[in-house]
Image (cartoon, rainbow, N blue to C red):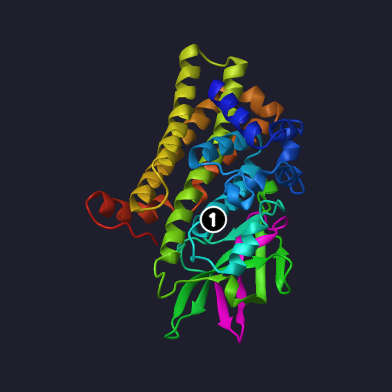
C-alpha cells in the first residue's frame, strides 16, 4: 500500500537498513522472547529518533515519529510497543533539557550520553494495574544524606532486559513530609535493581515487558526531577508532554500492526474491490487522526483532549478493520499460519493501555463542556 510504503521509506531515511533487517526475519521469530528486534533497533540508531540534534539525535518531529512508528509496527509490533516507551520518555525529558535551568547538570550530562551511546530508556511512569490512578507511583523514595533509596516495582516494563536507563515516577517526601511526585533517572546496572519474568502472553512477547524491582536502589538527589519554588510546573509540564507523546506513539504502533493485516488483504486480492477499499479507508482514517493530533502540538490540555479523541477513535476503527480483514482472508489462511492471527490479536491490545475509555469519560466530557481536563 502506498502510504505504508511511504512510512517504511521514511523509517529507512532515519534508520537506514532497519526495515530490510526486520523483514529478513520470519514473522514468528520477530515476536518471541529473545527476538533480535530490539538489538536491531539499537544498532540502526533507533534510540536517537526523537532526541534533538544538539544532543546527538535525529531530531524527528511528532508527525515523522508517528509515521516511523507505523512502519515499525507493521513489521514488528513488539518492537514498536517497546520503542514507544523509549521514544516518549526521550521526547518528554528532552523537552525539559532544551530549556535552561529545568534539569540539573547531572541530568543533562546523563541525557547527553543517550543518542551517542544508542542507549535505551525504559519507562516506569504509567502503571499497568487496573482500577488504579495511572499518575500515582508504585515506587517510594526514602531520603538519605545525599539522595534517595527507591523501593517498589514496575510491571509490566517494556525493554526491561535491554534498558540502559530506567525512568520511573516516585513518591518522595516533600518539605512538609507529605509524599510528592518526582521522576528518578536510574542506570539499569545499579545495585538493587533486578528483572523478573512477568509477561505470559505470546502476543507482544518480544517487547521485554517484564517486572523491574527496586530494593533500596540509591539515586543521587541530582538525578531526581521534582518541582521547585522557581519551577512549580516542571512535573505538570513533564506529565502533559509525556502523556501526549505516549498516546500518539503507542497508537501508531497498533495502527502499524493493523496496516500490515490490511496490506495482506489488498495484496492477496481478497473480497471485492469495494470490500478492500472499505478496509483501506478505515485504516487510513485511523492513521489520519493520529497525523492530525501530531500536527496539533503536545504541550497543553487541548493537546491531551485531541490525542485522547484520536486514540479512542483509532481503537474503534482498527478493531473493525481487523475483524473485516480476518474475515476476508478466510479460514484457510487462519488454519495454515498464525502470522495474521497474531497481527489481529496485537491490534486489539491498544484497548489495554492506560487510560481506559471509562476512566477518561467524565474528564473528557467536562473539558468539552468548558471545564478543566484532570485525568486520574
Task: Assign the N terminus to one quadrant of the image.
Answer: top right
Number of marks in the image? 1
Residue identified by numbered label 1: 94
Q: Is residue 155 magenta?
A: yes
Q: Residue at x 45, y 85 (%)?
A: 177
Q: Residue 170 location, x and y as percent?
A: 53, 71
Q: Residue 365 location, x and y as percent?
A: 28, 51
Pick out the residue farthest to the left: 370
Q: Nearer the viewer, residue 266 or 336?
A: 266
Note whether 372 is above or below 348 in the view shown: below
Q: Nearer the viewer, residue 152 or 225?
A: 225
Near mark 1 (Cα within 10 A), the count class, few <14, some 14-19 or many ≥20, is many
Note whether 270 is above or below 87 in the view shown: above
Note whether 331 is above or below 226 in the view shown: above
Q: Quadrant of residue 259?
A: top right
Q: Residue 334 location, x and y as percent?
A: 65, 28
Task: Assign the C terminus to one quadrant of the image.
Answer: bottom left
Decide whether the magenta segment is chiefly helix, strand or loop: strand
Q: Quadrant of residue 188?
A: bottom right
**Left or right of residue 38, residue 152 in this image:** left
Q: Nearer the viewer, residue 258 or 330?
A: 258
Q: Is residue 91 magenta?
A: no
Q: Residue at x 45, y 60 (%)?
A: 239
Q: Nearer the viewer, residue 308 or 26?
A: 308
Q: Residue at x 55, y 41 (%)?
A: 60
**Left or right of residue 361, residue 186 in this image:** right
| Res. 261 in view | yes
| Res. 51 in view | no
- In magenta, the rendered stretch is 139-165
Q: Residue at x 62, y 17 (%)?
A: 268
Q: Residue 297 location, x and y as percent?
A: 41, 45
Amino acid at each position: 500500500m502506498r502510504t505504508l510504503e511511504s512510512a517504511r521509506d521514511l523509517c529507512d531515511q532515519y534508520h537506514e537498513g532497519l526495515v530490510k533487517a526486520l523483514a529478513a526475519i520470519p514473522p514468528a521469530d520477530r515476536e518471541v522472547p529473545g527476538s533480535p528486534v530490539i538489538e536491531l533497533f539499537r544498532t540502526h540508531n533507533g534510540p536517537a529518533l526523537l532526541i534533538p540534534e544538539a544532543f546527538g539525535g535525529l531530531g524527528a518531529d511528532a508527525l515523522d515519529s508517528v509515521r516511523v512508528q507505523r512502519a515499525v509496527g507493521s513489521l514488528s509490533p513488539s518492537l514498536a510497543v517497546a520503542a514507544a516507551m523509549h521514544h516518549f520518555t526521550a521526547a518528554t525529558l528532552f523537552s525539559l533539557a532544551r530549556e535552561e535551568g529545568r534539569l540539573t547538570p547531572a541530568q543533562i550530562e546523563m541525557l547527553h550520553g543517550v543518542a551517542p551511546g544508542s542507549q535505551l530508556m525504559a519507562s516506569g511512569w504509567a502503571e499497568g494495574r487496573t482500577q488504579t490512578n495511572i499518575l500515582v507511583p508504585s515506587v517510594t523514595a526514602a531520603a538519605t544524606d545525599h539522595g534517595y533509596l527507591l523501593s517498589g516495582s514496575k510491571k509490566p516494563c517494556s525493554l526491561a532486559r535491554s534498558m540502559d536507563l530506567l525512568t520511573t515516577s516516585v513518591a518522595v517526601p516533600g518539605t512538609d513530609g507529605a509524599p510528592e511526585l518526582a521522576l528518578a533517572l536510574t542506570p539499569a546496572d545499579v545495585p538493587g535493581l533486578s528483572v523478573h519474568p512477568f509477561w505470559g502472553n505470546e502476543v507482544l512477547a518480544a517487547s521485554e515487558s517484564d517486572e523491574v524491582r527496586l530494593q533500596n536502589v540509591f539515586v543521587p538527589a541530582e538525578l531526581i526531577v521534582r518541582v521547585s519554588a522557581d519551577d512549580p510546573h516542571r512535573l505538570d509540564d513533564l506529565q502533559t508532554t509525556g502523556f501526549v507523546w505516549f498516546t500518539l506513539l503507542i497508537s501508531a504502533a497498533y495502527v502499524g500492526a493493523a496496516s500490515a493485516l490490511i496490506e495482506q488483504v489488498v495484496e492477496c486480492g481478497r473480497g471485492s474491490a469495494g470490500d478492500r477499499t472499505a478496509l483501506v479507508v478505515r485504516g487510513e482514517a485511523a492513521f489520519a487522526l493520529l497525523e492530525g493530533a501530531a500536527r496539533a502540538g503536545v504541550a497543553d490540555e487541548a493537546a491531551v483532549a485531541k490525542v485522547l479523541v484520536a486514540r479512542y477513535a483509532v481503537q474503534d476503527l482498527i478493531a473493525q478493520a481487523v475483524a473485516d480483514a480476518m474475515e476476508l482472508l478466510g479460514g484457510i489462511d487462519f488454519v495454515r499460519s498464525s502470522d495474521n492471527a497474531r497481527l489481529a490479536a496485537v491490534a486489539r491490545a491498544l484497548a489495554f493501555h492506560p487510560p481506559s475509555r471509562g476512566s477518561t469519560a467524565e474528564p473528557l466530557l467536562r473539558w468539552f463542556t468548558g471545564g478543566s481536563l484532570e485525568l486520574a
